[in-house]
Image (spheres, helix red, strand yellow):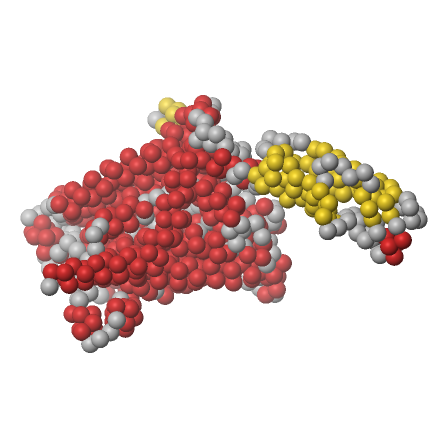
Amino acid sequence: MNKRTITPQGLAASAVLGIFYTILTVFIWYLTVSLLSPHNALPSLMHMIPSGLLLGAAVGYLRHTYRGNTRGKALSAAAGAVMGLAWLLLSGFRPLGTETVTFGGILGSLLAFPAAALFSRNSLRDVTLWNFEKGHAELLAMRILKSFGIFIFTLAVVFPFFFMLSSSLKPRAEYLMDPANLSVNLMQPAADLFRGYTDVLIRFNFFQFILNSAFVSMATVIITLIPAILGAYAVTRLHFPGRNVMSRIILLIYMFPAIVLVIPLYSVFTQLGLRDTRHGLLLVYAAMTIPVALYTLRSYFMTLHQDLEDAGLIDGLSRFGVILRITIPLSTPAIASIGLFVFMIAWNEFLFAYMFLDTPSIFTLARGMVMLDDQEVPRQYLMAGAVIITVPIMVLFVKFQKLLVGGLTAGGVKE
Amino acid sequence: MKRKYRSLAAQEARLAFWMLLPALLIVASIILFPVIANFWISFKSIGLGDLRPPVAVIRERVTAFPEQPGEELAVSYQVRNSSRERQLTDVIITADIPEGLTPVEPAGMWEFENRQMTAGFAQWEGGRSETFEVRFLADEAFFQADVPERSPTSAEVISSSKNALIHSPFTLENFRTVLRARNFHRSLINSFVYPFMGALLSIILGIMAALMLNKRFFGQGFLRGLYLFPYVSPIIAATFVWVFFLDPFSGTVNALLVDTGILAEPVSFLSVRMTELSLFGMSIPFPLALSMVIFFDAWRYFPFAFLFILSRLQAIPEQLYESAEVDGAGFFRKFWSIPLPQITTVLGTLFLLRFMWTFNKFDDVFLLTGGAAGTKTLPIEVYDNAFGRGNIGAGSASAVLLFLMLGVFMLIYFRLLREVDNE
């Protein structure tokens, strides 16, 4: 076997690693239990630190002794399980300090410590514990930071959406009793569970608003794309005086703030009778998205080879024939990603929907949410509304993520 | 040959014009025109009520109804201006004279023709209300025809008025109102602090997220998609969620912070203007609500910076890192010398872009706090003036100030872009 022995520095580094990962996994455990059950109690740091220290040292030792084979991994997990059992026994099977013995306490204890052990072990990869250097300490510090960072970021991103979903399924009495408990009683009849959704969809007419939002967003996509495709083609393929200035101006207009447009558009649309109408609204949406769409399409058209189009022209296609038969089919991905963006912008838009629409039968979802808020309905209803407006966007986003991410970095998206 | 070429070029230019026309028309009428109109309105004294044009209103009342032929029917017409201030022009009253009625002692202002009577006024002052009475002699035919008792002559009035948006006099009053408002300087300061801090935080978080997700590992792609959620979710849903989970009575965040002992009692995060933070024994004032709005923006917009920076980082060849590794460079040394120089130009434009967008931002602050508790910014000021106080002119004046400041930022931004392009 290998004669090299683990140095005190190596052991200390593993112990520190153990402390941090124990704190991390115990905190995740605590958070899960307190969000998903009526119990809230954070274990004391005075218990976490020595446990983590021991566990980390053990993992370091195992890692060193069994380097190069996989037995170390199983043994590390086992060390974690022993630590979990110790917590269970020492706390009388109430490791989170709850009043009664809980499922979350027992299972969590048996999961958190093995997880901490495996995280620590994983972080020790490429680190030579018999020859521990300064560079290794820095590497380990970065790994700990990264783990905590990923945990915090993921929590910050997921928590609001989890809160939204959970709240939409909980009546007022339940969330007022224990605001920290976000668990949902799935055992109740579906009619009670989804009361918020059925009421919002039917009683508050959100069903109609979904249709309105879908109509407005899809119509906006069409009214944006047609002028944008024509314009982008003209700017990239045709020569005319002022061509370069045109592209500059497009980019400039893209920066104009909606709040500056709101007063004149409100005034003029009121006098023209366009204000409280769907076509007035989607005209505004189209105007706000045409510059971005044109600019992004222009960038895309510039990457296309002109040979095919020239061949089409020579073969006797008209300009519009070329656009319809060659340019558009060649740029389907770009057009699709812009179309999706425009759809999302129109679907999410708040300011103009809020300022323009007064008649409930033409409300978009965003405007409908404000109406719900005015009526002092319980949080459950508003959160059900929020889920209804969010889910279609998330589905679209997840489904077409590749397409959208490319477009997002290419042109940026107007908010 | 030259001629022919030129005419082809002209043809192409004409085609380009027609192809650009739809886009130009929509953008010019919905974006450029309103911006210009905004400047115009900011010099006019216009209230929300003035948008609806004033009209003449008529009320017809029967004061005496005949019982038998030979008696008189008396009708009074009350005509008034719906506006107290604004003048009407070309007010024309028309009324039908039913069969069997003959006007008694035809008054000077009325003209009778084909069983119709009309009266016209070239001008009608704001707030003016007048009543005219006309009497008719009824004969047999009147009783045979079924004349309604309420408004037997179905009187109507038409009028026109000057459009307040165009015809009201120019004034500097709006700018005076805006600049002299008691808390204007606060909004102005917030308008810089909020976008500055919001942009800065969102970019710092974006760099952190990009560095964490730069190397491949299990779940990297999933997390990358997940981290974009705040950015694509509808603003109205995101803000409502934040308002609810920060709520002092029913919010989860407060409950957790109190349970873990971090807070002694629940805090109303979005409605407390100032709080004291004790740090190393000193207590420093801390603008709580404004900070929460900034945190919200950092949360919502970090994905934007994250995506940009990540795509830059991933374009850096792996060998660069490897050779630095061989040289024994530590993490910070590596970060300082490899990716940071690559992303500094992106960071500059990203910061300006985010700064400008947040500077213009209305939705976030409006939906989170409504501009209360020391979070008022210029866009909220625009809304409050125009629609909260009903002073369209003052709202436009605030919008003009906002637009001018934005113009300065845009100038810097485009200069920076040009420098980046030149590199």
Q: Is residue B67 visible?
A: yes
Question: What residue appears at the point 25 percent right and 55 percent down from the top-left corner?
Answer: A410
Q: Is residue B199 left or right of residue B419?
A: right
Q: Is residue B55 visible?
A: no
Question: What residue appears at the point 49 percent right and 37 percent down from the top-left corner?
Answer: B165
Q: Is residue A306 left or right of residue A375?
A: left
Question: What residue appears at the point 10 percent right and 56 percent down from the top-left corner?
Answer: B319
A188 or A133: nearer the eye? A188
Question: What residue appears at the point 43 percent right and 62 percent down from the top-left corner?
Answer: A218
Q: Is residue B117 left or right of residue B6?
A: right
Percent coordinates x, y for residue B349 in the rendering? 24, 43
Of the 4 image quadrants, the one containing the N terminus of chain A is: bottom left
The quarter holding residue A76 reads bottom left
A317 or B200: nearer the eye? A317
Q: Is residue B146 left or right of residue B345?
A: right
Percent coordinates x, y for residue B57 in the rendering? 68, 41
A133 or A75: nearer the eye? A133
B209 or B259: nearer the eye? B209
The quarter holding residue A223 reads bottom left
Percent coordinates x, y for residue A412 in the rendering? 29, 52
Percent coordinates x, y for residue B71 in the rendering? 90, 44
Residue sticking out furthest to the bottom: A315
Asked if A329 appears above or below B95 in the picture, the reply is: below
